[in-house]
Amino acid sequence: MSAAAPFQRLVYYSRNEVDGDADALDAAIDEILSLSQRNNAQADVTGALLFNTGCFGQVLEGPRRAVEATFERIQRDPRHSDVTLLAFETTDARAFPNWSMAYVGAKPAQAVRYNEIAASSGFDPSRMTANRLLETLHGLAMEKEA
Ligand SMILES: Cc1cc2nc3c(=O)[nH]c(=O)nc-3n(C[C@H](O)[C@H](O)[C@H](O)COP(=O)(O)O)c2cc1C
């Protein structure tokens, strides 16, 4: 028998509810990221956030209670809806040890464009499994880190 894993990992996707043009979305995502980076650093939470085609995808990892408290706040946030949990699991190692919250999406303004053109072929987290979403975010974060 192995000891309980030290970290909790949570993966979800949700639907964007920020109204307005690309600049409004840009500003909203900047605000979400700076809040996240400050709160998560204090709470020992790490992870990554993706925005594309009208959806957010996010991985949160850290001590279980910190991840749960963070997710409870996130779920109440009116800037998104239909928050759908894909995974809630223990893990021995963080996938994003160096990121209080990595943003791995395109610039929001570009993402809005993708949103318009990629309805059928683009990133659609609602068709992804937790592992695929985790791998996608992890690959993008590692590219950023390199
Ligand atoms: C897509 C999305 C992701 C978010 N990710 C985080 C996060 O990782 N950490 C965090 O503290 N807040 C995150 N937030 C913001 C929270 O919902 C909330 O606004 C923030 O934690 C401040 O909560 P408070 O006003 O209750 O203090 C996120 C919000 C959205 C819409």
Image (spheres, grey):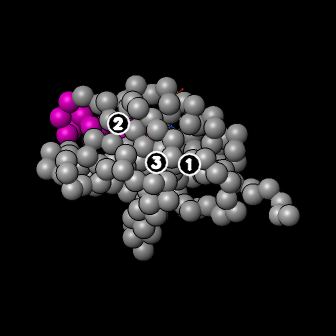
| Residue shown at 13% from the left, 50% from the top | 117
Dot 3 beta carbon under 8 Å from ligand 1: yes
Q: Position of residue 4 (x, y in %)?
A: 80, 56
Helix, strand or loop under label 3: strand
Q: Read off the magenta span.
A: 20-33
Say above or below: 43 vs 92. Answer: above
Q: Which residue in the rendered view is the most extreme toward the right?
A: 1
CB-based contact (under 8 Å), mark 1 and mark 3? no
Q: Who is closer to the viewer here, 66 or 8?
A: 8
Look at the magenta stretch and give its main secondary structure. helix
Q: Which residue in the rendered view is the most extreme toward the left?
A: 117
Q: Earlier in the sequence, mark 3 or mark 2?
A: 2
Could you classify mark 1 by the number of other residues whose Cα lies within 10 Å: few (under 14), some (14-19), or many (20 or more)? some
The question of residue 94 being in magenta is answered with: no
Which residue bears the numbered disc 2?
15
From mark 1 to mark 3, how far is it between C-alphas?
11 Å
The question of residue 25 being in magenta is answered with: yes
Q: What amino acid does circle 3 point to?
A: Gln
Which residue bears the numbered disc 1?
87
Residue 67 in view: yes
From mark 3 to mark 2, how far is it between C-alphas?
12 Å
Helix, strand or loop under label 1: strand
Which mark is drawn over residue 103? Answer: none
From mark 1 to mark 2, how far is it between C-alphas?
17 Å
Q: Earlier in the sequence, mark 1 or mark 3?
A: 3
